[in-house]
Amino acid sequence: MGKDAVLHVRIDMEEKRKAEGLYERMGTNLSEAVRLFIKQSNIVHGFPFMLLSTEGKGMLKAQSALKVYAQHEMREEERISWIRSLSDKYESLNR
């Protein structure tokens, strides 16, 4: 199977840097880790791991947030908000 699709994801720069270091130490890279995540998700028809909360509690809250985000309308609102924020930044730079 060819690699002809592109996935764009916006994440925190520090989280990305940490993940890149982690996967480099494991002998792979972040792109391959994302590909593995997607393959495993398709195999198990869901997350290929148990979701954990860093606060010790709130697992149900985290799952609830994921369910809300899975709604197409919420993704569309986030996309529109992101585009607006970029537009605002662009305008402020050109004033």
Image (cartoon, grey):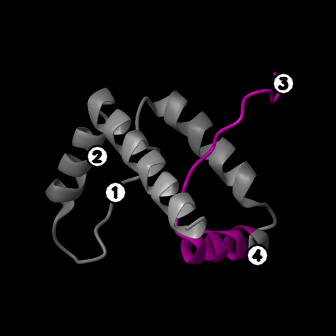
Amino acid identity at mark 4: Arg
Would you place residue 55 above or below residue 51 in this image?
Answer: below
Determine the secondary structure under disc 4: helix
Q: Which residue is mark 2?
A: 66
Pick whichever of labels 1 and 2 is earlier in the sequence.
1
Determine the secondary structure under disc 2: helix
Pick whichever of labels 4 and 3 is earlier in the sequence.
3
Q: CA distance from mark 1 to mark 2?
A: 10 Å
Q: CA distance from mark 1 to mark 4?
A: 23 Å
Determine the secondary structure under disc 3: loop
Amino acid identity at mark 1: Leu
> Residue 54 at x, y = what percent?
31, 75
Kindly check if marks 4 and 3 are in contact, taking CB atoms under 8 A apart as contact.
no
Kindly check if marks 1 and 2 are in contact, taking CB atoms under 8 A apart as contact.
yes
Q: Which residue is mark 3?
A: 2
Q: Which residue is mark 4?
A: 25
Q: CA distance from mark 3 to mark 2?
A: 30 Å
Mark 4 burial class by Cα count in 10 Å: few <14, some 14-19, many 20+: few
Instruction: Please tell me whether residue 22 belongs to the stretch shown in magenta.
Output: yes
Front tag of 4 and 2: 2
Pick whichever of labels 3 and 1 is earlier in the sequence.
3
Q: Nearer the viewer, residue 43 or 58?
A: 58
Front tag of 1 and 2: 2
